[in-house]
């Protein structure tokens, strides 16, 4: 296990999502949400599944639906019409503590949510971190003379 700061985990998950095909805004929301999911002791499996599903899947499809549902909330209850069991896992990644999540045949109800306090650090397995870093590496510019001529990397003035 690796003891990681929340910022480190968020950054690598954001880059991993970008490496798998999410746009910058979706990747940033995923990184923040995934950290919150891990802070709530959520399982790591939905994170891997969401990354594997890109460029489609929950990162792309659910974010807009969740934001719309939250903006239309009445009181402390939000209702999402869905048959998809992955919604519950994705909703736990919201930056709120959900005091009740119930799933019926065609809907998920969230009641009374509040800001969740975050721990200072997370314990992430070395294997998970290595997998995320490998996905994040897909966003890196290749080390070639041509890429350097196009402006990649540090120039001499950057090292002064």
Image (cartoon, helix red, strand yellow):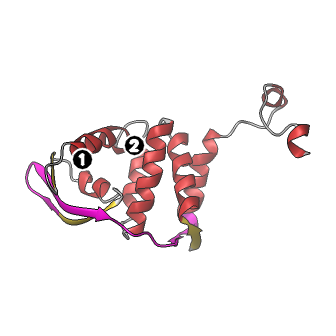
Residue 22 x, y percent position in the rendering:
47, 38
- Residue receiving disc 2: 53
Asked if the stretch drawn in magenta spans residue 108, the answer is yes
Residue in front for this viewpoint, 28 or 70? 70
Please report the residue visible at 28 percent of the width from the left and 64 percent of the height from the top.
114
Asked if the stretch drawn in magenta spans residue 151, the answer is no
Which image quadrant for residue 77?
A: bottom left
Please report the residue visible at 26 percent of the width from the left and 52 percent of the height from the top.
86
Residue 121 x, y percent position in the rendering:
53, 72
Magenta span covers which residues? 101-127
Figure check: 143 above or below 86? above
Q: Can you name the residue that lies furthest to the front here?
A: 75
Q: Residues within 10 Å of mark 2 (few under 14, many from 20)?
A: some
Please report the residue visible at 36 percent of the width from the left and 68 percent of the height from the top.
40
- Residue receiving disc 1: 70
Tag 2 secondary structure: helix
């Amino acid at each position: 296990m690796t003891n990681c700061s929340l910022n480190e985990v968020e950054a690598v998950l954001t880059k991993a999502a970008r490496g798998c095909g999410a746009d910058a805004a979706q990747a940033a929301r995923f990184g923040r949400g995934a950290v919150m999911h891990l802070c709530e002791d959520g399982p790591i499996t939905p994170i891997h599944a969401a990354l594997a599903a890109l460029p489609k899947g929950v990162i792309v499809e659910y974010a807009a639906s969740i934001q719309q549902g939250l903006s239309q909330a009445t009181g402390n209850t939000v209702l999402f019409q869905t048959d998809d069991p992955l919604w519950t896992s994705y909703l736990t990644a919201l930056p709120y503590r959900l005091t009740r999540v119930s799933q019926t045949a065609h809907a998920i109800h969230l009641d009374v949510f509040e800001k969740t306090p975050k721990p200072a650090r997370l314990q992430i397995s070395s294997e998970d971190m290595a997998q995320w870093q490998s996905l994040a590496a897909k966003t890196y510019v290749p080390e070639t003379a041509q890429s350097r001529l196009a402006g990649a990397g540090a120039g001499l003035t950057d090292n002064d």
